[in-house]
Image (cartoon, helix red, strand yellow):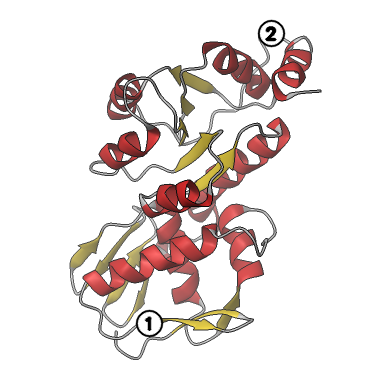
Amino acid sequence: MGFIEEICYFWHLVHRGRRLIKFSMDSVLIIDDDVKLGCMLREFLRRREIQLDIRHNGELGLEAVSKGNPGLILLDVMLPDMDGFEVLQRLRVYSEQPVMLLTARGRKADRIRGLELGADDYLPKPFDPDELVARIKAILRRCTQHSAMVPAQDRRICLGSLVLDLNSRTAMYKDVPLELTDIEFSLLEAFIQSAGAVLSREELAIRLFGRPFHPLNRNLDMHTCRLRKKLHSAAISGNPIKTVRNSGYLFSSTNL
């Protein structure tokens, strides 16, 4: 059964009027010119208690983001007016909301480019709809779990001159803001909380993406590389994120 046929099958199982769980980050937005796919995907996600808003080109998608507050943006790379990479570049000028790229272009260079531009995840088409749901929930959970788990009096963590505010999910170094995506913030938070100890890729993959680490998936390494560059741009001397061969990463506070 293909992707479209599978969603059609589930569409017939939908109970209309079912009460939806309201995520604290509001709805998920999909920017994709495939009208039929968008409508069927919305019904499939309704069954999984996820609300979906749809826009069919890049300009309308950017407008929806600027006016609303989607908890996650599903962004197709192949759009009629501008490609998804351009949408992502323009989006990152004013928004750090998490973005998952959806595309039939599965080339390694495209995946790397998307992650370098600030995408949080990448799912090639055709995809298993259950995997899409799992990834959506993992990202939404990562965005909301901190406020539920951390006491109000402990909403800031510091390491040297590096300060993370867990309420606003913002980071500063020597009182200068760091422009981080949500997943980069979560990565830096994990590093700071485990400073001086090796964090395995397996542990980081579960914490950041909600799924096991796969050695052929470079998402984690690309996000780590982007975080390194941003820390370097903030004039943090040396390289605080050390790669430990065959193990993972170690965050050093020596130069902070």
Please name the residue shown 45% across and 32% down the image: 75
Question: Marks 1 and 2: in contact by CB < 8 Å?
Answer: no
Question: Is 85 rendered above or below residue 163?
Answer: above
Q: Which of the pair 84/187 is nearer the observer?
A: 84
Comparing labels 2 and 1, the label whose residue is closer to the camera: 1
Amino acid type, mark 1: Pro
State the separation of the CA atoms marked 2 and 1: 52 Å
Q: Please state, as top left, top right, bottom left or bottom right, where the C terminus lies in the image.
A: bottom left
Left or right of residue 156: residue 33: right
Q: Position of residue 101 (x, y in %)?
A: 49, 39
* Residue in front for this viewpoint, 70 or 234: 234
Residue for point 19% across, 75% down: 174
Lower sequence index among marks 2 and 1: 2
Tell me the quadrant of the picture where the N terminus can be found: top right
Q: Which residue is mark 1?
A: 240
- Left or right of 231? Residue 182 is right
What residue is rendered at 56% in x and 58% in y?
208
